[in-house]
Image (spheres, coloured by chain):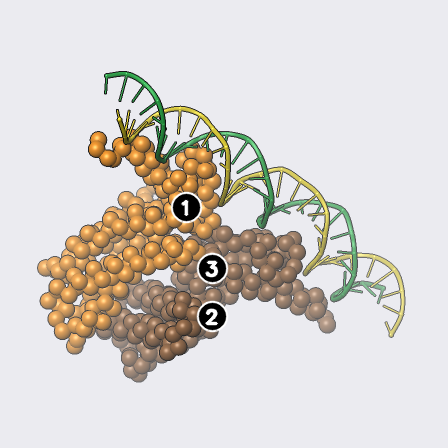
Chain colours: A brown, B orange, C yellow, D green
Amino acid sequence: MSHTPGVRQAQKQKTRQALMDAALGLLEEQSLSSLGLREVTRAVGVAPTAFYRHFPSVADLGVALVEEALGSLHPMIRTTVSPAEDSDERIARAVELIAGHVAAHPAHVRFIARERHGGVQPVRDAIREQLARFAQEVKTELAKDPVSAGWSDADLLMLAGLYVDQMLVTGSLFLEALEVQDDQEAQDDHGAQKEARRRAADTATRQMRLISIGRRHWLD
Amino acid sequence: MSHTPGVRQAQKQKTRQALMDAALGLLEEQSLSSLGLREVTRAVGVAPTAFYRHFPSVADLGVALVEEALGSLHPMIRTTVSPAEDSDERIARAVELIAGHVAAHPAHVRFIARERHGGVQPVRDAIREQLARFAQEVKTELAKDPVSAGWSDADLLMLAGLYVDQMLVTGSLFLEALEVQDDQEAQDDHGAQKEARRRAADTATRQMRLISIGRRHWLD
DNA sequence: TGTACATCAGTGAACGCGCGTTCACTGATGTAC
DNA sequence: TGTACATCAGTGAACGCGCGTTCACTGATGTAC
């Protein structure tokens, strides 16, 4: 190859990803500010000192995790909020999308919920920045909707923020529903977890519907 | 005195409170799962072993802090949500009340925001329980309002949950506004912090107003 | 294609340090008579 | 009121342990010619 080494870089990237994956796993039951560097390297199976080849500190690994957890969500936001024919249908689609994302990446969602107000400032800042970007993107989509005719910029951003916060609240709600199964350890076979998930979806749907109604009558 | 010792119990209570106060102070810049027992006793000026006379572990101190932070808020909730003449006036009162509470007890508010999804399960559980109580109390007050005529129980609880979540979102918003001052270190004397607080109040007011509008048109 | 040198991801020993917890103790406060 | 004994909040020494970070190293991969 011309200039990109190949094998060596690929192996490095693999180890780096293994460190992030191991950290994310360990963070299911503790917060970043108590996560140890040795804990992470032990879980991966490399020497503690290898950590420094990839991150200056655990906090920097945390910032990388924020990017991984939220970076890929921007395109999804765009398509979800964009104007649709029926409001109820769009809400149902958004709730299902959040439910699916939480089911597919529970550890990422938990990490963001936990560290958004957590004890590590660079990570809090990275999350705040990503959420602000989300709000701007949602605002841009909302502005395209005919329903937003006559809305001030400040009001559009206010509503976008409400949607972003509500997205996180809904994510946490589904996360709690996922934890129901762990509690009962398969002794109840007709699905208390499914029931919890259904109730979470129901609550989230109604809340979004109420916000949507408020939106339609905002300029009355 | 008859059966209550007095001096000894009072001194014990004083030390216990000092431990809680010191912990709350230390928790401004870290999360509970990384707070050390020795750190807390050092801040108070007692021997590490004295800690065990008051709490079995740091997690139990955390649960006591949840009680301290949220226990006294229940009466406030009741009077704030209860039916009022004018909706906008009630919203303004609620936002001011939250702003005042955050200004008076920032460390308590930060602690709740941080540990609600934090790494210490007993503390998460204690917070969840208190918030569920809030939701029930809000629901009871909402039910008394003529606006709620025809609402199902599930819808009332859904709205109560939305209000409780919004209360926490607003609290966090004011908390962020408080941190603006620290960043600039008095080099800007015409109050960037006051401006941030005003914008937080403005956003919170508009969001609550939108929810309130959605509420009024829920049964349309 | 083959060789000689450079790079650098991962190693392993070593360090000083603060941690949580144990234990027997002390001495002021509380209780019984 | 005075005395003798019980209680118990706070002490201080000691322990074994895992932590983050340093350093010189090794050996596979990459590069120059």
Res A29 label: 3
Q: How far across and how far down the image is residue A11, in percent?
A: 67, 66
Provide residue A201's location: percent of width, then percent of height. Answer: 33, 74
Looking at the image, which residue is at 52% across and 63% down? A25
Vertical placement of A108 versus D16: above or below?
Answer: below
Three-letter code for the amino acid on which mark 2 is drawn = His
- Is any part of residue B117 visible from this angle? yes
- Label 2 sits on a secondary structure element that is loop
Q: Label 2 lies in what chain?
A: A
**Is residue B188 visible from the viewing direction of this image?**
no
Which structural element holds mark 3?
loop
- Residue type, mark 1 in image: Pro
Callout 3: chain: A
- Please tell me whether mark 1 sits on a helix, a strand or a loop: loop
Q: Which residue is mark 2?
A: A105
Where residue A150 sits: x, y (%)? 24, 71
Measure how far apart labels 2 and 3 are at the Cα level. Answer: 15 Å
Location of the C terminus of chain A (image quadrant): bottom left
**What residue did someone put label 1 on?**
B56
Q: Amino acid at mark 3?
A: Glu
Name the image quarter holding the N terminus of chain A: bottom right
Q: Are marks 2 and 3 on the same chain?
A: yes
Which residue is at a point 58% across and 58% down the rendered structure image? A40
Q: Check the image and report above or below for A80 versus A24.
A: below
